[in-house]
Amino acid sequence: MSERQIQLEVLRYDPDTDSEPRFQSYTVPCKNEWVVLDALNYVKENLDTTLSYRWSCHMAVCGSCGMMVNGEPKLSCKAFIREYSDNIRVEPLANFPIERDLVTVVEDFIAKLASVKPYLIPKEDKPISAGEFKQTPAELMTYKQYTLCINCMLCYAACPQYALVPEFIGPAAIALAHRYNQDSRDGGRDERQEVIASHEGVWECSFVGACSEVCPKHVDPAGALQQVKVASTIDWYKEHLMPWVKK
Amino acid sequence: MEVINTDVAIVGAGGAGLRAAIALAEADPKLRIALISKVYPMRSHTCAAEGGAAGVIKSDDSMDLHFSDTVGGGDWLCDQDVVEYFIHEAPKELLQLEHWGCPWSREPDGSVAVRPFGGMKIKRTWFAADKSGFHILHTLFQTSLKFPSIQRFDEYYAADLLVDEGRCQGLTAIEIRSGQMRHFQAKAVIIAAGGASRMFPFTTNGAIKTGDGMALAYRAGAPLKDMEFVQYHPTGLPNTGILLTEGCRGEGGILLNKDGRRYLQDYGMGPETPVGQPVLKTMELGPRDRLSQAFWHEQKKGNTVSTQWGDCVLLDMRHLGEKKINERLPFVRDLSSSYLGVDPVKDPVPIRPVVHYMMGGIHTDINAATPLAGLFAAGECACVSINGANRLGSNSLTELLVFGRRAALSAISYIQAESRSSNDAILATQAQDSESRIKALFEKGKGSETISGLRKEMMDTMEENVGIYRVGEELAKACEKIGELRQRYANIEVHDKSSVYNTDLLQALELGSMLDCAEAVTVGALARTESRGAHQRLDFTERDDQSFLKHSLTYYHPKDAPRVDYLDVVITKSQPGVRDYSGGKK
């Protein structure tokens, strides 16, 4: 099995002892199939037990291990060493405060996710005993893509607007609201519009599309944002130009 | 120390913990609920489950069939009254998830689709493509956001249960961000903290699956049950242990040895079925224990494919075609292509058995209640005995829903049954003792042992001696070794002295949990001198219903090996028989 030695340059910051972040370099012998997370685990097990970072599944589904790898937001469990040169720089996700080393403070994201009412608000009441809501495969396909978000926050780290305007609700949360709006079982769009059609909602997006580029699950939050904008514009026209038409 | 008063504290915010929290909030909006987890809820390992969740919904299916599949699949170590309750609740819970928005895959007419799964006589596995656990977890998490009474304590590590007058009355937990200890005073506690398969080196389980919930209950006096039953999933990627769902075979994938032979027919699971037309409950749709054991025999015979990651067999899905693979198994294609460099559309995928699931766990009764008053448990950390000696694929996602809810309802009944006073001074002292224990571990210098060193010795011991086939001599060696590692654990040192997000300290605590659980596994395995389900002994090759139609119970001892006791299995209508996976043909 081929091995390659890399220099892993890792941002370190401990608020207990450091006044500002610094970089620490580790020499790591990597196997060809390794991902950046494997290299970090090598450091943790063999070189420096004080390094802190989040991870769990190692299969790109739990969303814990997002970080900047050579300046780009990546899941470190899916950033293959073979795709990088011998010098790899790892930093915490951009646009979030650093808690410790590669660990960021994520409360803002969690609060924004909760703010869009990301749960089914049923169109009709139906007891469990009456069975399932019917939903055809075609109806499922209209929103399925937006259910795939793993909340890894790479899109927030890539979003220039979130960097400038921290109040911006942001790509993942809006995509999730859109996911429920598009669900044939749901009747909660009006409630969600109050949040996502607000100033901090879709109108803040400048449609750079960086969110969709970095999304490891191909959710395409930029597409969701665009669709919400179009729908919100139609709402506005209906409300102001055709007040006799119900939304 | 800050005291947080609550009615019910839940440890773990994966599928079972979230389901419990929602059930509590729905039952009584005034209940104070503390949902405590060492990770944010959507990081919980429920997210990695792929294949689906079993529940009788279609007209060709019946409760009796789900019952007999489960009990036979578990080699008659299931409690049959619990299985009966489970299968009847299952469809309701899956429908409830549908009503909460879970994006289940659908039939053309809009009804929920089901897929075939191993050991099941009828197609009854509800699925959301091959990310069923992910969608269940996110649906539950998102639904939980509706309920203001669910107060989350994300990234808190539960350290010790507080027990006074024979009742569990709360716990201590470390706020990971600050390193501060908190005292949760609760009328009831539900543990839903997942499995412990990280005690093995080659596992499908995420880094967080370190048996903390099991160890919490075990140290507080609740026994662990049937810990010797460890499930190997037959199809893991050989380099990473990443799971390729049983759905691969449910959809028609076949297993081949190095000669291209569908070798399962040589192990009582034949005759061969037509390629691409899977027949339920035979060949590739046999149960996981039998498939993993067949691999072991093929390896001994030299029939496996040698790869740089060890011996493998081949999972061939090429005949399914790109369209079906993309529709039904997109994640499998992505995982196999990215991590192994093999595209299942174009090539057979080398795979080998990988540690996946603990059938054993905290002993609970049918109501998800442990023998310790005020303590309940659900999900993989618990052993409510629906899985017996071998869990059928797709029963565990359903289990965490059914028994997550059950634990919540039982906790409410317990709280309402009588008003109990607490001795706050005693609880405060216990919380202080807990803090002192952690502090001593944190501050101790000059340790002669490293966390990663001990962890590696533990993992190697488990892999070498407590695998698919076991033998007394090796198990005895493992017991001795794990006992020794528990002693040496006293000499570890936490090098990271920061109070903020100290993962060195967390790993030390997790290692402690794993060692306690590993000892229960090895001691239980040595004591069970029979072969049943996932516990196969080369020195006791037959199932012995005379002596071992019983659950093992291991009781914690702080220094010595645990005491082992036994409890009769509940049989209601199915007497132990022959597990037949021959497809009905002789």
Image (tube, coloured by chain):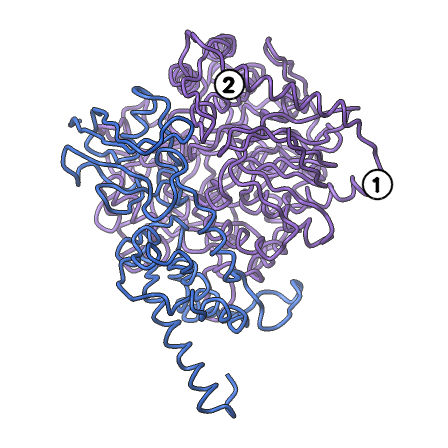
Chain colours: A blue, B purple
Q: Nearer the viewer, residue B33 or B342?
A: B33
Image quadrant in which you'd find residue B458:
top left
Q: Mark 1 belongs to which subunit? A: B
Residue B515, disc: 2
Element carrying mark 1:
helix
Amino acid at the residue labelled 2: Leu
Find residue B36 and report its horizontal and vertical position in percent: 58, 38
Give the farthest residue toward the right: B418
Quarter where residue B389 is shown? top right
Could you say which is closer to the camera, residue B487 or residue A207?
A207
Residue B212 pos. (x, y %): 54, 28
Where is B65 relative to B266, above or below? below
Residue B299 vs residue B151: left or right?
left
Real-space Cα separation, disc 1 to disc 2, in angstroms? 37 Å
Task: Residue A3: tell me if it is visible.
Answer: no
Q: Residue at x 50, y 29 (%)?
A: B196
**Residue type for callout 1:** Ala
- Which residue was labeled with disc 1? B417
Q: Are marks 1 and 2 in contact (CB under 8 Å)?
A: no
Q: In the picture provided, is A65 more to the left or to the right than B487?
A: left
Left or right, A8 with respect to B503, comes to: left
**Does A184 sit above or below residue B246?**
below
- Indicate the chain on which mark 2 is placed: B
At which x and y percent is residue B495? Answer: 41, 17
Label 1 Cα crowd, 10 Å radius (few <14 / some 14-19 / many 20+) = few
Residue at 58% of width from left, 24% of height from top? B215
User: For the point 64% across and 16% down, which residue is it?
Assistant: B564
Q: Is residue A127 visible?
A: yes
Task: Assign a secondary structure to mark 2.
Answer: helix
Q: Report the disc number at residue A38.
A: none
